[in-house]
Image (cartoon, rainbow, N blue to C red):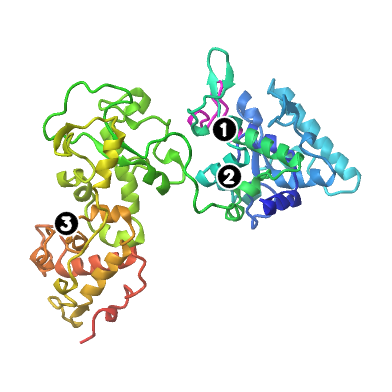
Amino acid sequence: MKKGKTFLRGTGIICGVVFSVVFAWSIGARGLVQSSASPDKPRADIITIDALKSFGDLERPPVIFLHEKHSDAVEKQNKDCSACHLKEESRQSIKFKRLKDTAKKTTMDLYHAECIDCHNQTAAVGQKSGPVTCGQCHRQDGQVASSWEPIGMNNSLHFRHSKALDKKCERCHHEFNESTKELFYAKGKEGTCRYCHRQVSEENRISMRLASHQACVDCHLKQLALDKDAGPVKCGSCHEPAQQKLIKALKDVPRMERNQPDAVFVSKVKESQPVAEPPAEGSISLVPFNHKAHEGYNDTCRVCHHAEMNACAQCHTMEGAKDGRHIKLAQAMHQLGSNQSCIGCHERNQKKPECAGCHNSISRTRVFEETESCRMCHVPARQTVAGAETVLDPENKMLAAMLLEERKPTYTPYPDEEIPEKVIIKAISDQYGPAELPHRKIVKTLVANIQNNKIAGYFHRDAGTLCQGCHHASPETRKPPKCSSCHGKPFDANNPLRPGLMAAYHQQCMECHSAMGLSKPKATDCTGCHKRK
């Protein structure tokens, strides 16, 4: 923190002209934007001044404003944020020279008068200044690349703030009372700011962009004014990729204290909703879920609790409800490609290099939609516990923990002596000689890759599961059939989706090497696998 404090003072305490502009108006921080600045120096402080859009279509192009360029100039004049921003109660307003927008002409005149006057005064004392004519500000030519990257409050940053504020959660967390029209602190119901503050301002809620800059930067400025350690106050310090890498990330973040369960049943029943009737025999409606472990796998609760902190079934009902955007519970949990679903998260793990080699060649529907794979997570609603049949209670967290404890997330392959050391592929040798496959070495490498991967250890339950990465259409067996049993040497025109034997070998091997990031053998070097005849 001491280094951060020195850095902040070295770069200045000022928000500068732009801070209000940055958020009161849309930020043109992505892609290329208009400016007379050098195009070969990407910046993270690019702000688009288009405040008049709220009154109708713009008559001229918006003004591209470089925040830190102006804040540095203001700092050199021994001024601070108040040079451009007024006080709103005890907080710095994010708007430029005003607290609210009134009329189009008033807002336009304010910008023209204040900005041009400042530029004229600066030029009058012989200092480098900014433009004073319409065409110099409202430009369509000239571009500067943006290096702006979003930043969020992950678990590491949250813990650092919580510790610095002595766990006074009310400093940041609040809710809105509809009857009194006031903010209040609801202890025990703290959630991410994004649950209320959306991408754009609406009704009584300002956008997330406005809320975070209004609250965070203002707090940082006040801490600095008191000669205390504080976070950044300039655009680049948060949104410049190089600066983001300098933010201290804690390796072992203490668990967030929010009375969350260690283990829980993921159920179709809403919180505190009684079970209407006992489940049918063989029903697999419950999933024991290791909540504590999954907290450690992710850097924010929003990965799963993307709308609010309640149970998934609260919004995603079996039939679909408005609160859950009519996404049914089954879809919410099993949707492939979704960032919030269980299956979607597991699918992303399969794209890691150590997993992608096998999973690239296995049908996703085969992995996720077979009945047997359902039982990897779901459990029968009627269980025999301690010798007695028990109907699982969705609210029984202790029972969920017991069922999780019984699961063994370890994979044990076949013994070495049962795995062929080498396999000679000679069925299609013609111009080149047979390919010698170091079979046992490959298997042992794949096993080593997933040795410390809990999710892989859990889902690869049988010794032959890993073999199916290559033998993708074969049942789990010690001696899977040869590739030629499915892929004929000549291409079969009656099965256009099934490649011939040569194509099958090359596609399987080369795509696996590519997915796993292996450099050898090169795809263009046939002699890497074959000897030329």
Amino acid carrying label 3: it is Leu
Q: Residue at x 58, y 27 (%)?
A: 206
Magenta residues (range): 195-210
Query: Circle 3 sits on which residue?
Result: 497
State whether residue 152 appears in this view. Answer: no
Distance in Å between CA atoms under marks 1 and 2: 12 Å
Q: Under tag 3, what secondary structure?
A: loop
**Closer-to-camera residue (49/74):** 74
Figure check: 487 above or below 381? below
Residue at x 23% of width, y 35% of height: 286
Amino acid under disc 2: Arg
* Residue labelled with disc 2: 160
| Mark 2 Cα shell of 10 Å, populated few (<14), some (14-19), many (≥20) | some
Residue contact at pointers 1 and 2, CB within 8 angstroms: no
Residue assigned mark 1: 169
Answer above or below: position of 418 versus 176: below
Q: Residue at x 28, y 81 (%)?
A: 527
